[in-house]
Image: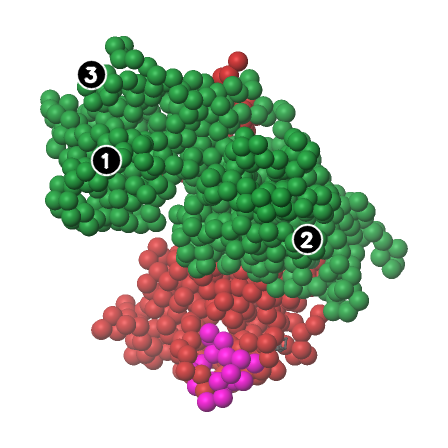
Amino acid sequence: MSSKTVESIDRVVIRFAGDSGDGMQLTGDRFTSDTAAMGNDLSTLPNFPAEIRAPQGTLPGVSSFQLHFADHDVLTPGDAPDVLVAMNPAALKANLADVPRGATIIANTDEFGTRNLAKVGYAANPLEDGSLESWHVHGLPLTSMTVEALADFDLTRKEKERAKNMFALGLLSWMYSRPTDATENFLAKKFGSKPEILAANLKALAAGVAYGETTEEFVSAYAVGPAPMPAGTYRNITGNAALALGLVAASHRSGLPLVLGSYPITPASDILHTLSSLKRHGVTTMQAEDEIAGIGMALGASFGGALGVTTTSGPGVALKSETIGLAVSLELPLVIVDVQRGGPSTGLPTKTEQADLLQAMFGRNGESPVPIVAPQTPSDCFDAAMEAVRIATTYRTPVFVLSDGYLANGSEPWLVPEVSSLPALEVEFATEPNGVDAQGNRVFHPYQRDAETLARPWAVPGTAGLEHRIGGIEKADVTGNISYDPDNHDRMTRLRQAKVDGVTVPDLEVDDPSGSARVLMLGWGSTYGPIAAAVRAARKAGHAVARTHLRHLNPFPANLGEVLAAYDRVIVPEMNLGQLALLLRAKYLVDVRSHTAVRGLPFTTTELADVITAAIEELA
Amino acid sequence: MTIDLGMPQLLANGLAGVPALAADAAKQTKKDFTSDQEVRWCPGCGDYVILATVQGFLPELGLKRENVVFVSGIGCSSRFPYYVETYGMHSIHGRAPAIATGLVTARPDLSVWVVTGDGDALSIGGNHLIHAMRRNVNLTILLFNNQIYGLTKGQYSPTSKVGQVTKSTPMGSVDQPFNPVSLALGAEATFVARAMESDRAELTTILKAAAQHRGTALVEIYQNCPIFNDGAFDLIKDRTQQEARLVRLRAGEPVTVGTEEERKVLVRGTDGGLVFVPEAEADPAAYVIHEPGAADPSQAFALSRLDTADMTHVPMGIFRQVERPSYDDLVRAQVDGAQDVAGGPAGDADLDALLRGNDSWTVA
Ligand code: SF4
């Protein structure tokens, strides 16, 4: 055990930053797992370039992973790091602006040679020229200490150097009193077939811990106690993983086999990867020739009575639009997952944005309503996926799930539900004729609707006596025959709209503990964490402010209009240029205020807290 | 890295797994496959003949009607599903192969047919068509080729001839057309055939072979559009000219063209290419014998290139018919295999374990 003192703190934000090839995402993931296992609440924010390996040592090649953990409820990955681990000058330069003065910087001095400094435009070594005086800087030769620790290993110098991220992880684990067992197990699995590499990584990890214990550089370690959390089983989970599991759970609860048609696209591909490894759960995945085929396969499977799903990002949605319109017309269940990223066009593939809301809402020809649900945290992607399946199967309609890059890659602890406690998703296929023709014969009418839900029957091929043809051409009400009749088209258009408008959606709940707030913060999707954290900060500062968050973007909850009318000022923060605000203004004639940013990053708590304060002051 | 898929046993028949009509059920007739919808093609359209042939042929398969599905895209030919009393989907332009892939992969108990045209399949849907064939999805694709866009009223298509004057090519088309058979062979198709709408007996024979083929069967059907491209195939329909031009491919036989008196035989020339020579002058040892089952598609491809824009020679029949595991069988085998290894379909406990993952902890 360490002989050094251990200081207790309630929260800390650490950012690991290095070259894309330095293994920062892995280091962050491991630190997160070890932290989750300690019982802290946490939230993470990976931030990496779209290029797989941008030129070494350059600013575009910097990859980082931020982790916020605490002995209390954590809502965001943290505005600013308390500790920056910078594996090279590029990592320091790219991240310094986010690191407040007084914070700690641990820099790998081995990489601060003239060439690397020059690559990012440092004329002098910032670790030595006094420019970092206001920070606590620990310049440590992480690479050479790692190589030295591995002196006895029969590996090339390059291979030894590669273990430096484990040395850094070991050091930080000591610093924040994290156990390393889970990482050791993880390494054993990862390098099982390469014993020498495994041994080297374990040695580097242990050397990092030992260095922390013995060096004079650090006087004390820190401890962050566990956060009080409801009893139960937890795991740490990213949004993409939770979304995949939610789809599998929905398939399980509905009894419909899950069929995914998808095409690789950042940041949605991980859902395809996860689902393709879950064949044991009856999941069929098809990597299609393009985005259009991906959704086509899913829709074909839905026609056959499966749970058809397609996963993509904004550019993919653009390509799938025509098929989504077909699904609206065919009135078949289909789930479209859009993990939003910065746009337009290729935009910012690895950065987050919420700018596909209007695309999901209106991005098709004709009147083509589609229900939309949006998850608000990484683990909430599980529930959002199940909710989308409920709507799709109950109302026989395509449904959008609007996730985003921040939710997709970010992670948090998740209270794992018992399968038996999940909502049952009952689905009934048509088995009998439901109508009578002019001659009095019993016939099947594919567009005869359920009186309550307005859903049409789901009659799957293989059901004798219900043979029928459906298509994208306008159909006659009830019979489904081709119809160009003007009144019929008007009726069918209104019926499709009424069906979506009638989707049951729970009323919006407002968090307004004082009951006297005049300002309402209203968000949707991944802004949940930053908004909730900002509201918490504002209340701590003595302000009364209300908060609510939309899970359903189409249709809106029935009480939304009342909620909006109850406040003097409604502020809608969005990572777009005001898309939800536009919808609210149009629908409710309310002067909502937009607060927007499209920087590819989530809002900070400080920024939103300032917005709240300004609004309150303005009203006063 | 690649691994041996280690599976599955090859299913020989395209209809394996599709429920047959009960032995004591009334025999199906053409009427059973005729829907109550009014057929809306132009008078004299070749599509009528194809529809009648397919409706007349389907009873031969002896399948439960409810297990047959027709999926189409957009175009004149794509109205086809409305007229057949089975399940059907009239989808969107070019996408039928993708939709049908999802359907047949999810439902091995269905006989899935795609009806498409030259514009639908080869222009807007070209990508889906080639990928369906490369994967060898268990589908029968009927490609009605009338060398024109009909439904949009007469623009040139990807099979229109160079120089063809249409509404959108008043000075003649400058586009090199696709040869659908060559394209299919290049796309790794395992069954490729060509038929003519007017030869109902031959079309029926090919449809039967195509339906029974496990994997993608592409059947190009020459179809006359009397409104916008009338007479496109007259040279090979005209009884007096037909014999001199039609090359009827017969498995295991020499490839010939011409009448009894003036027969020519296809031989491999000294340069390796294929040439027709008068039967009397040909060395039987040099005869090209048609082998649709050959693993190497080169000769089938060479036969497809006998086709010329002026229709001097037009090969008809089955160009290629080989066995390769179908995509949907392989996809299902992986899912079934994963479940078998784990001892059956996942139950609540398995899903609970999946949700917890490998790195969970408990808060008391
Ligand atoms: S336009 Fe041509 S192909 Fe279309 S229905 Fe009329 S005749 Fe047939």
Magenta stretch, overall SS: loop
Which residue sits furthest front? A620
Q: Position of residue A30 (x, y in %)?
A: 35, 28
Of the numbered discs 2 and 1, the one sitting upstream in the chain is: 1
Query: Label 1 marks which chain's residue?
Result: A
- At a point 46% along the width and 64% down the height, the residue shown is B126
Kindly indicate which chain is depicted in green in the rendered structure.
A
Closer to us: mark 2 or mark 1? 1
Distance Cα–Cα, label 2 vs label 1: 51 Å
Q: Which mark is residue A590?
A: 2
Camera-nearest residue between A43 and B323: A43
Q: Is residue A27 rendered to the left or right of residue B346? A: left
Of the numbered discs 3 and 1, the one sitting upstream in the chain is: 1
Amino acid marked by disc 1: Glu
Residue behind label 1 places its C-beta within 8 angstroms of ligand 1: no
Query: Label 3 marks which chain's residue?
Result: A
- At a point 53% along the width and 67% down the height, the residue shown is B120
Amino acid marked by disc 3: Thr
Q: Are marks 3 and 1 on the same chain?
A: yes
Observer able to see residue A386: no
Kindly indicate which chain is depicted in red in the rendered structure.
B
Residue A595, compared with residue A493, is above or below; it is above
Quadrant for residue A214, please give it.
top left
Disc 3 on helix, strand or loop? Answer: helix
Q: Position of residue A72 (x, y in %)?
A: 49, 23
Query: Label 2 marks which chain's residue?
Result: A
- The residue labelled by disc 3 is A214
Closer to us: mark 3 or mark 1? 1
Disc 2 on helix, strand or loop? Answer: loop
Mark 1 surroundings within 10 Å by alpha-carbon count, few (fewer than 14), some (14 through 19), many (20 or more): few
